[in-house]
Image (cartoon, rainbow, N blue to C red):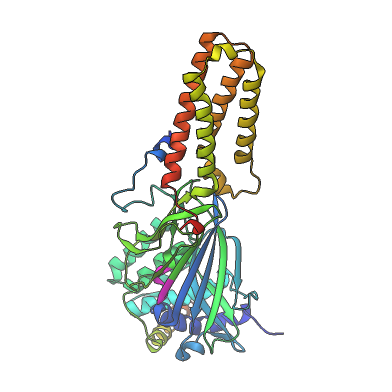
Amino acid sequence: MGSLRHFFRRPPKSRKGIREQSAVVGSAEIAGPAFPRPVSGEEARAALERSRARRAAANGGAA
Amino acid sequence: MQPWPGEVLDERSGEIAVGFAALLTRQAAWRHRRVETITVLSHERVRRHVSVDFTVPEAHRAEIELSDGQCVVPLAYLGKRLLVNFDLFMEDEAAVPLLRSDEAQSIARELLYVMLDIDTEDAIEEDIGPLIEWILAAGPGEEDAVDAAVEELEGVLGPLPGFVALASQLTRGFLLCAVVSDVSRRRVLKFEYDQPLGRPSRTAHFYDTPGCTQAASYHVEVKVPEELRARTTELLDDLSGAVLARGPRDTDRPAIHYVAEPDVSASPGLSVIYAPERSRFLIPAALVAWVIALGLTLPWLFADLPSLSGAPSPAITILLSSSAIFSGLVLRSGEHPLVRVMLAPYRLFLLAATVAAVVAGGTLAFHGSATVVNWTWGLGALVAVLSAGILTFEAARAPATAEDI
């Protein structure tokens, strides 16, 4: 029956959901995170220092 | 001996994470171009070749340095599953070292802390540490539970957009990090791997392209097997059905260029519809089917078939000529597996016409009664005409070969 469907096939009216109708080849990759805004190096370094200070304090407190 | 990378990574992971935070939140600013080439190996497997053309901004080169001029460059996010035939090369095809997933995790850990601290300064280490370790160690099937825990954290601390986005992807994948010796100039790194098809298919393939938004410019092309053509090639968003870019019709090397919107929220993929070329198989097959159809129909209509019963000449002629032509078209070695699968139904129609001729010839050779001979030839003629008609119809709507265009 698959062959008969093939011979009488018509192009789909909409492409929506066409992935479900096709043989899908996934990607080993996944999409990158949708970050809300760019982060500067200075901003990231300041965040790292704050975070490390908090982690060091927590570890010290735990010890 | 150079202490690379295990001993150095612990010490450098924080600084590298600072560089990664700047690079990964503006990927299109330093990745100039990304090119994907999809080679169809069979109806069950494709090989994907990806090249990333980039220049690390001068401001971040020192941050991502591992040791002695060797830098860690984040190329992509890979899913947490087995990679088949994975290779990583530089411009001259020389192999490039890459961080193991557990090595990349030490950078990812710091990156999660950085993104969390950018979103909020209220996080408390004792509460966050186990969650971050869970994100990094999560395996397939744990995604929903980790997402729920992250959502719960967001409920406590308020909106954490950067952390949530990163945590979601690091739950499902890990950073592919290449170790490159010289990032002071523009570089091109390439990686490739095999991927199976979700289910075998003859005509319609859909290739996920999550990388199309990870560079300023995206280019994808498909190496179509010989004897086939890509009828249509479209880069589209499966969620909305919107066609993002369209490739040329009926080509053996369809290519699409796409400039991605950096904030697009979509499920992009490449939809390709394949079809066999007209002149390689379909036209010869249709001609053979018509020869058989005429060879059966004309005698059935105009000849006195029962009088030929027992005469070997016409029967043997039909048997031998049909078998020889049929064998030439059907038994071909070295054919691409997808071509073989795609031509299978057409070969069945040709087989039906040939069998009809053989059976009709057999009724004469074995002294069939007048009724049997007439019915066999009539039915055989009908089968052959139908087969020839279908093959002709398919040949007419099949794409032409390059030299025919």
Q: Is residue B243 above or below residue A50?
A: above
Q: Position of residue B11 (x, y in %)?
A: 56, 83
To which quarter of the image does residue B125 belong?
A: bottom left
Residue B242 in the image: state x and y as whole percent.
Answer: 30, 60
Magenta segment, which residues? Answer: B212-218
B148 shown above or below A40? above
Q: Is residue B280 magenta?
A: no
Residue positioned most to the right: B1
Q: Quadrant of the C terminus of chain B?
A: bottom left
**Residue at image x 45%, y 24%?**
B382
Quadrant of the image occupied by residue B266: bottom left
- Towards the viewer: B198 or B309: B309
Pick whichever, B12 or B350, lies toward us. Answer: B350
Quadrant of the rendering where the N terminus of chain B is positioned: bottom right
Residue ID at (47%, 65%): B221
Q: Residue at x 60, y 16 (%)?
A: B364
Q: Is residue B114 above or below residue B87?
A: below
Q: Give x and y (percent) for residue B46.
A: 54, 56
Query: Do we see residue B120 in this rendering?
Result: no
Q: Position of residue B166 (x, y in %)?
A: 40, 70
Nearest the camera: B112 or B388?
A: B388
Name the residue nearer the viewer: B107 or B202: B202
Residue B399 in view: yes
